[in-house]
Amino acid sequence: MARASSTSAATPAVFTVTQLMAGIRATLEGVFPEVWVEGEISNLRAPASGHVYFSLKDEASQIRAVAFRRVAASLPFAPEDGLMVLAKGRVSAYDPRGDAQLLIESLEPRGAGALQVAFEQLKARLHREGLFDPARKRALPFFPRHVGVITSRTGAAWHDIVTVVRRRCPLIGLRLFPVPVQGPGAARRIVEAVRLANRRTDLEALIVGRGGGSWEDLWSFNDEAVVRAIAGSRLPVVSAVGHEIDVTLSDLAADYRAPTPSAAAEAVSPVLADMRDGVRARRLRLARAMRRVLAPHGQRVERVCRALPDLTHIVRRRMQRVDECRSRLGRSLRAVVAVTRPKLLAVSAGLTGAALGLSRQRARLLVPPLRQRLFRAMPGVITRHTHRVRAAAGTLHTLSPLAIVSRGYGIIETSPGGVPVTDARAVEVGDRIRVLLAKGRLSCLIEDMDRTSSILTSRDHGV
């Protein structure tokens, strides 16, 4: 009985297969909640469900792996057999087969060959979408007042850009958006900086770049999110990543690709001295063109001026005519007064005599009608003489030299002497002349003259 009892106490616990696999799965998931595994992809399968199944192997071992549809759709490259990758995930077990497997959460290519494959795959896909189409690229502004720069604050790229812009055109303002340019999280920070720069209204162009480095160091600028942010930028973008031989997807999506950060600074900053020289040259060409255009018109003006009659003689004749009209007007007014005065005196004397000879009653009857007749006659006499005076004044204004001079003409006389000048040959350089205008007079000194023209060049020495 004792032996039987001992045998019964040593009986092991019995598990079903399902219980055993559940325990193994729980143990694996508890011990390996997050692992990084480097290996080569093999036995890749991508069924219609969107999940991706493959194995990760090295020289001695392999483990099954699965990237479910959500993770597989976010991968920046298409997994292929033979690629070396770095996988992040958690270890679990697949009960139906009894296999351990790696549940993939992220996947990155490892090695230059794998990165090149991922680069070419993403490049082809974005090219099909039109992100690299030359037709969508915009020209850079010729003279931007403010330029944004997305790069590392401590890198050589920022120093090179500042140095070049300050040397070529100090008037351009630079605004730095500091970001890490390599390592985890760099791509996300670059995308945020591009969006922040596009929200500013003072910027006119954007430089995105960094100095040289290895293929892995430059990989952030091949990130799909960075490429799409650059392609969708409202501001024209200059990409300057690495050295001249380095080409990233950001270079292909940008509006302008610069081989170096210094070349990017040159692309957005014209040389201020060259701009000044260009303005001077254009001003000289414009002046020569204007002289060519105006020369024929100046000759026509000179011919018209020569064909015009002598203004001095015209003015003097009009002044003489005004004097005559003034004299005639005075004589007419005196004659009218001389003729009218006796009549008025006679009427007044008659009224006085009549008033003395008539009785007071009769005078009261006769005086009002005579007064009314006198009052009725006087407006007519005054109106007729008023019309004559206005007509004479109109004629006087028409013939007045002041009316002619008020239209912009002037009378030129020698000073002293007051002799009218009608010919440039009558004066010499250094002579003084007087110009009579509608309001005031000018005393001028002749500094230059053209005897073939009727136009004198002088400088005003006071009024």
Image (cartoon, rainbow, N blue to C red):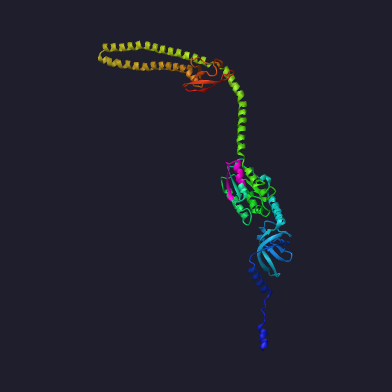
Q: Nearer the viewer, residue 323 or 345?
A: 323
Q: How many marks?
A: 0
Is 165 one of the magenta-colored residues? Answer: yes
Query: Looking at the picture, does residue 290 appear above or below residue 452?
Result: below
Quadrant into which the N terminus falls: bottom right
Asked whether the viewer can see residue 175, the reply is yes
Is residue 268 toward the left or the right of residue 385 in the image? Answer: right
Horizontal and vertical percent position of residue 413 = 50, 16
Query: In x, y percent, where is residue 281?
Result: 62, 32
Q: Quadrant of residue 377?
A: top left
Q: Tell whether position 13 is magenta.
A: no
Residue at figure coordinates x 29%, y 12% from the top left: 352
The x, y position of residue 412, in whole percent, is 51, 18
In front of the other: 404 or 33: 33
Q: Nearer the viewer, residue 392 or 307?
A: 307
* 34 or 304, nearer to the observer: 34
Drawn side of residue 389 relative to residue 206, left or right: left
Residue drawn where x is 61% and y is 37% of the image: 273
Q: Quadrant of residue 135?
A: top right
Identified at 62% across, 56% down, the residue is 185
| The magenta segment | 160-177
